[in-house]
Image (cartoon, rainbow, N blue to C red):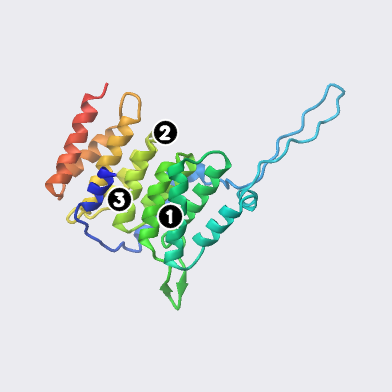
Amino acid sequence: MKEAGNARSAAQSARSAAPSAYLAIGAALVFFLMPALALRAQASSTAGTQSSSGAASQPASREITIEELFLKSVEFQILREKAASDDFEIKMSALDDLEKRVAAGVSGSDTAQVEFVLEYLAMEGSGRISRENGRQVNNFPEVRRRAVGLLGKVGTEESKDALIRALLIDVEPIVKAEAAYALGVLGMNDHNEVVQALDFAYNREDPSAPDQNFGYAVSLAIEKLAQKTPGGLKDPVAYRLLVKIAQGNYLRTVKMKALQVLDELKGAK
């Protein structure tokens, strides 16, 4: 996609996150995502109802769990095993398979399985860390970047929540930028929680040396959210964020994009 390519082509400035930053990230996750952290795979059953004779009817069938969904499909069992592999190339192969499925369109129970595997890969090395002899052995930023990009095309509330987690947890600029852009592609912004997450992530940047790619991706995300919101975005947080980018220590291309989006928001009816 041309826009995504423009975002990735902007100059990048990597930086290390301070350990104390994780406290702020954890607090932000509670604020943004606590309502969505209930176990989605938990089975449930409906209460029995009384018949006309007074006898209780049998409870309705419980919802199928993610585990049971995987057991119904050899293809998804293989995908899950590839995603759980310690090998980078095997994980990338799983993403190749998932990309084809997303491009072809997913629906029904397939959607839950695709989202589950993508969320697993999006947390590989950030939300889920493996160590050997004190050294992290599963830091695969490119795996996470591709996974969050595909999550933006799945179109579920769960994928939105996973993208917000990636945006707030990940310290890799390329992953954060892709997560921001993917949230715009997804276009879900109930109660402005996505704009607030973008603003929180942006405010953690070093203003003296911000990541150019991330700044551009945030502008793109707000632009796409506005396009998918009837009447455009009516959130002062979004306006303020774009002004910060426009006056920040960015390349002219990034600043001009922020100003362009501000003009679009101003003209929205």
Residue that badge 1 annotates: 96
The count of marks equals 3
CB contact under 8 Å: marks 2 and 1: no
Q: Residue furthest bottom?
A: 133
Q: Residue furthest left?
A: 252
Residue that badge 3 annotates: 177
186, above or below 248, in the image: above
Residue at horizontal 40%, vertical 33%? 191
**Rendering coords of residue 118 (x, y %):** 47, 52
Q: Along the horizontal axis of the image, is 15 left or right of 230? A: left
CB contact under 8 Å: marks 1 and 3: no
Real-space Cα distance between discs 2 and 1? Answer: 31 Å
Q: Nearer the viewer, mark 1 or mark 3?
A: 1
Real-space Cα distance between discs 2 and 3? Answer: 21 Å
Q: Nearer the viewer, mark 2 or mark 3?
A: 3
232, above or below 123, in the image: above
Residue type of the residue flagged with mark 3:
Ala
- Which one is earlier in the sequence, the residue at label 2 or at label 1? 1
Residue that badge 2 annotates: 190
Real-space Cα distance between discs 1 and 3? Answer: 21 Å
Please indicate, yes or no, whether residue 29 appears anywhere in the rendered image: no
Residue at horizontal 19%, vertical 55%? 11
Residue type of the residue flagged with mark 1:
Asp
SS at circle 2: helix
Taking depth in this image into account, of 149 and 56 the one nearest to the observer is 149
**Rendering coords of residue 33 (x, y %):** 46, 44
Residue type of the residue flagged with mark 2:
Asp
| Mark drawn on residue 158 | none
- Which one is earlier in the sequence, the residue at label 2 or at label 3? 3
**Rendering coords of residue 232 (x, y %):** 30, 27
**Rendering coords of residue 153 (x, y %):** 41, 42
